[in-house]
Amino acid sequence: GAGVSQSPRYKVAKRGQDVALRCDPISGHVSLFWYQQALGQGPEFLTYFQNEAQLDKSGLPSDRFFAERPEGSVSTLKIQRTQQEDSAVYLCASSPTGGGVDTEAFFGQGTRLTVV
Amino acid sequence: SQQGEEDPQALSIQEGENATMNCSYKTSINNLQWYRQNSGRGLVHLILIRSNEREKHSGRLRVTLDTSKKSSSLLITASRAADTASYFCATDGFSRTYKYIFGTGTRLKVLA
């Protein structure tokens, strides 16, 4: 596709439910990032993939958060047993190189998760 | 935790005026980037400046970098209503090469 695509755009989950957020990066992009953005704040790093390898997951806030990119393209961020503090916009970004952050990142529109 | 802070937190100007926003960061860097985020949308890359550069231009945008002060500024000249957005700086955290570390953002409002 032309850009990074995320789905769903909006998700409302009851507390305790599991959710899965999908990211389709730009075709051929090596690097893929997940970020969490609380209202009025800047994005906070969650995890990074280089192709299918998850090289950094230091930003995942708890073991309820899990991300995968099994074939080096589409990625899924899964949150188990959602809590109210998980309410945020989840942003996915990709970049063409495997060097991490030495080039611009292309962001998707984000998924707004609301836990009620 | 955020790497840096943008200043001011919010800025309101008239169309045609220039807008300046500043970013301070904490650690050494290899590069610094500026992004724009329109309400409810994703981030759009504006400009990347490397640690050995002091100034960079792109259209109506001018970015400066002072590594001795660990600060950067973004100047938007002849602002337009369409420039209304939040602006974030992002650094690479030097050794932490897998993270873009974002600041807290400046909310710019350009009045027509």
Image (cartoon, rainbow, N blue to C red):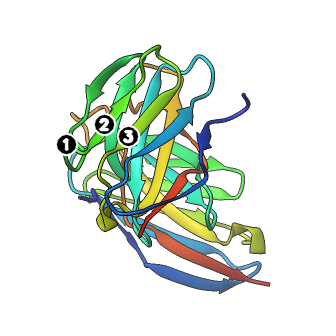
Identify the residue position indicated by label 2 in the image.
A66
Q: Quick check: B56 above or below B26?
A: above
- How far apart are the alpha carbons under marks 3 and 1? 10 Å
Local secondary structure at mark 2: strand
Pointer 1 with pointer 2, Cβ within 8 A = yes
Chain of the residue where label 3 is placed in the rendered structure: A
Local secondary structure at mark 1: loop
Kind of residue at disc 1? Asp
Kind of residue at disc 2? Phe
- How far apart are the alpha carbons under marks 2 and 3? 5 Å
Q: Which mark, by number, is residue A12?
A: none
Q: Residue at x 62, y 58 (%)?
A: B41
User: How busy is the neighbourhood of tag 2: few (under 14 within 10 Å), some, or many (20 plus)?
Assistant: some
On the image, the x and y values in percent for residue B106 come to 48, 72
- How far apart are the alpha carbons under marks 1 and 2? 7 Å
Identify the residue position indicated by label 3 in the image.
A78
Q: Quick check: A80 above or below B107?
A: above
Quadrant, the C terminus of chain A: bottom left
Kind of residue at disc 3? Lys
Pick whichever, A5 or A9, lies toward us.
A9
Q: Tell which circle, 3 or 1, labels the residue nearer the N-terminal end.
A: 1
